Image (spheres, rainbow, N blue to C red):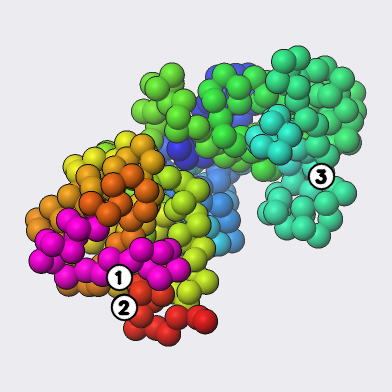
Amino acid sequence: MKVHEYQAKAVLKSHGIPVPHGGLARTAEEAKQIARDLGGAVVVKAQIHAGGRGKGGGVKLARDPQEAYRHSSNIIGMDLITHQTGPGGQKVKQVWIEEATDINRELYLGIVLDRAQSRLVIMASQAGGMDIEEVAAKTPEKILKEAVDPGAGLQPFQARRLAFGLGLEGDGLKQGVQLITALHKAYVATDCALAEINPLVVTRQGDLVALDAKMNFDDNALSRHRDILQLRDTDEEDPLEVEASKYGLNYIKLDGEVGCMVNGAGLAMATMDIVKYAGCSPANFLDVGGGTNVERVQNAFRILMSDDDVKAVLINIFGGIVRCDLVAEGVVQALQGITVDIPVVVRLQGTNAEAGARILEGSGLKFRVARELKEAAEAVVEAVGGAPNP
């Protein structure tokens, strides 16, 4: 689950990490009042779940409350386009008004889970304020890394090594060690999936401040963090993804034309690959799970049909825990309950696959039953109007 910058900063602040003072505004008038309360220059920052806001015109420096009002008027309501929003952009509904910081240096600090090592990895770089992906691609030597032993936790010498690597000295070095340690504690305590401070700035007074913050949280751990769950902003999420989450469906919207409904994440990835190989692109990732039943299939199919980009549907079910005949019944009931004017290809394998195929073929509904995955992929490409790759 993603949260806004101002929410991430509140979490970091609760763990002792310095952040600038600020306030949230949903109107330009509110922004003006917050700027007046803060006094002096402020920064107006669009709050959306995407990076690159500054390059898209969503971050502006205001020298006084009136300028904060003017910038907020332009930003609130705009469709902010960044490299993470897609071509349509994301509508800005609120801005964070933050006191301006006297910056001397910009650094980078972040924590991610390295699945290859099964450890958290803390990354630090003196190339802050830039896209860390670009730094990693062009100058990877500028990124320092420390893998944290899950049993021992972050060791003081590791925090010191990172702080030294950031070029911190004297009191700044002490602040750096404390901040790195605090970020690690915040990450673990809140079951983060990603914690990133970019930039982490050194002010001209020598203080370290988290000028920007990004935190993503593990969906599977949110039951332990009701306070974090309350930070969810469904307006920032795809409506179909929000709808799917209500029924426990794992759904991610993509930009293709073939709707995919599969049971199991690995099979879903393989299905998307073979659709692409056959000559089309998947419109979604949809894993209905191992405990698939009629109701779940109905809801999944209804969500697929709600996507205007979907030109054909491929249902690929492997019957292990789930029975193919139950899936077939769900598909039939779903097709009977809604208007379907696009081709549907169904491929069933595994437990009661033949019984499921008989249910589909005897339903009187118009869809194609395939026995093999290659056959199903080629059929759905033909249904879209393409020529399958040989």
- Whichever of callouts 1 and 3 sits on the residue coming sooner in the sequence is 3
Q: Is residue 135 left or right of residue 331?
A: right
Seen as rendered, the residue at the extreme front is: 354
Q: Secondary structure at mark 1?
A: strand
Quadrant in which the N terminus is drawn: top left
Q: Is residue 136 above or below residue 197?
A: below
Where is residue 266? Give x, y as percent: 50, 48
Marks 1/2 in contact by CB < 8 Å: the verdict is yes
Mark 3 sits on what residue? 143
Identify which residue, 69 or 126, lies in the foreground: 126
Marks 1/3 in contact by CB < 8 Å: the verdict is no
- Whichever of callouts 1 and 2 sits on the residue coming sooner in the sequence is 1
Mark 2 sits on what residue? 383
Per the rendering, the mark at residue 240 is none
| Residue range (magenta) | 356-376
* Quarter of the image where one finds residue 368: bottom left
Q: Is residue 251 magenta?
A: no
Front of the two marks 3 and 2: 2
Residue 380 is at least partly visible in this image: yes
As shown in the figure, which amino acid type bears the numbered disc 3?
Ile
> What's the CA distance linking mark 3 and mark 2?
48 Å
Residue 66 is at least partly visible in this image: no
Q: Residues within 10 Å of mark 2 (few under 14, many from 20)?
A: some
Q: Secondary structure at mark 2?
A: helix
